[in-house]
Image (cartoon, rainbow, N blue to C red):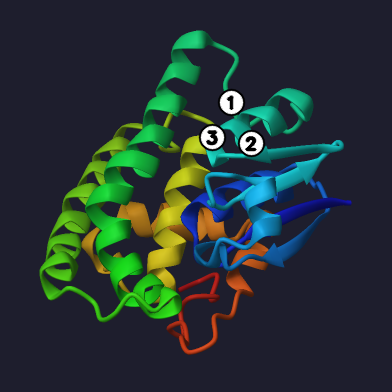
């Protein structure tokens, strides 16, 4: 069985978990306190970051590389389009969420509210929290614009771009930092994606000291 070293609310870990689950790859989840830089974990990934996945006898790190490997070795069901231009758009949006959204929103909300407490780095910085709360509105509006023109974020079919976005938003939803009333089309998209069997383990996550809102695991909101 595959083994994933992860942190439950990490959007990068969640993206890998969704990819594995969508392709029905059984995986053992091992929570890793990566910030403690345990010697065994550093041997798995000298960068001291999660996710780290052991699959096919290979130890791999970095969520983008992991998801690409999963896609190349388990192409069915596909999370990447066949056309090069369409794959380009998927990769652009994955980068949007894992870089821009992460920098402007996830790191300002999730990391301030949760990660600092978990790692013993102190209290949330209110300036960062306000910045993240403001920035997420812009990103939801952008998603709304995309979904007004497409069935899914990158086109007519669900792709890794949708999983990347859902990984970040589900982590923020766990701490009640997503205003689903801002966009009906984004709310409908998220309801669709969190109803997939691949999302079940994500919705079952429980983080000690943090209780998710009542709608978190409700497939109908």
SS under mark 3? helix
Q: Quadrant of the C terminus?
A: bottom left
Pick out the residue farthest to the front. Answer: 39
- Residue at the spot 53% in from the left edge and 51% down from the top edge: 49
Q: Residues within 10 Å of mark 3 (few under 14, many from 20)?
A: some
The label shown at residue 66 is 2
Task: Residue at 71%, 57% (x, y): give it.
Answer: 40
| Residue, disc 1 | 80
207 or 49: which is nearer to us? 49
Q: Which residue is mark 3?
A: 64
Q: At x 38% / y 80%, what residue is drawn?
A: 117
- Mark 2 or mark 1: whose residue is earlier in sequence: 2
Find residue 172 and report its horizontal and vertical position in percent.
38, 66
Dot 2 falls on a residue whose secondary structure is helix
Give me the C-alpha separation between circle 3 and circle 1.
13 Å
Q: Which mark is residue 137?
A: none
Q: Are marks 2 and 3 in contact (CB under 8 Å)?
A: yes
| Label 1 crowd (10 A; few <14 / some 14-19 / many >=20) | many
Q: Nearer the viewer, mark 2 or mark 1?
A: 2
């Amino acid at each position: 069985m595959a083994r994933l070293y992860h942190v439950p609310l990490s959007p990068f870990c969640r993206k890998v978990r969704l990819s594995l689950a969508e392709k029905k790859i059984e995986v053992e989840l091992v929570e890793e306190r990566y910030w403690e830089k345990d010697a065994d974990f550093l041997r798995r990934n000298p960068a001291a970051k999660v996710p780290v996945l052991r699959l096919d006898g290979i130890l791999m790190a970095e969520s983008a590389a992991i998801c690409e490997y999963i896609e190349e070795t388990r192409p069915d069901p596909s999370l990447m389009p066949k056309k090069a231009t369409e794959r380009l758009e998927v990769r652009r949006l994955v980068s949007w969420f894992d870089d821009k959204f992460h920098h402007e929103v996830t790191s300002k909300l999730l990391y301030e509210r949760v990660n600092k407490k978990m790692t013993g780095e102190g209290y949330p910085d209110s300036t960062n929290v306000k910045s993240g709360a403001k920035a997420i509105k812009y990103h939801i509006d952008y998603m709304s614009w995309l979904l007004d023109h497409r069935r899914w974020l990158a086109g007519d079919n669900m792709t890794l771009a949708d999983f990347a976005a859902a990984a970040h938003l589900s982590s923020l939803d766990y701490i009640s930092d997503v205003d689903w009333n801002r966009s009906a089309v984004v709310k409908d998209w998220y309801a669709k994606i969190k109803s997939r069997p691949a999302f079940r383990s994500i919705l079952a996550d429980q983080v000690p000291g943090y209780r998710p809102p009542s709608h978190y695991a409700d497939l109908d909101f």
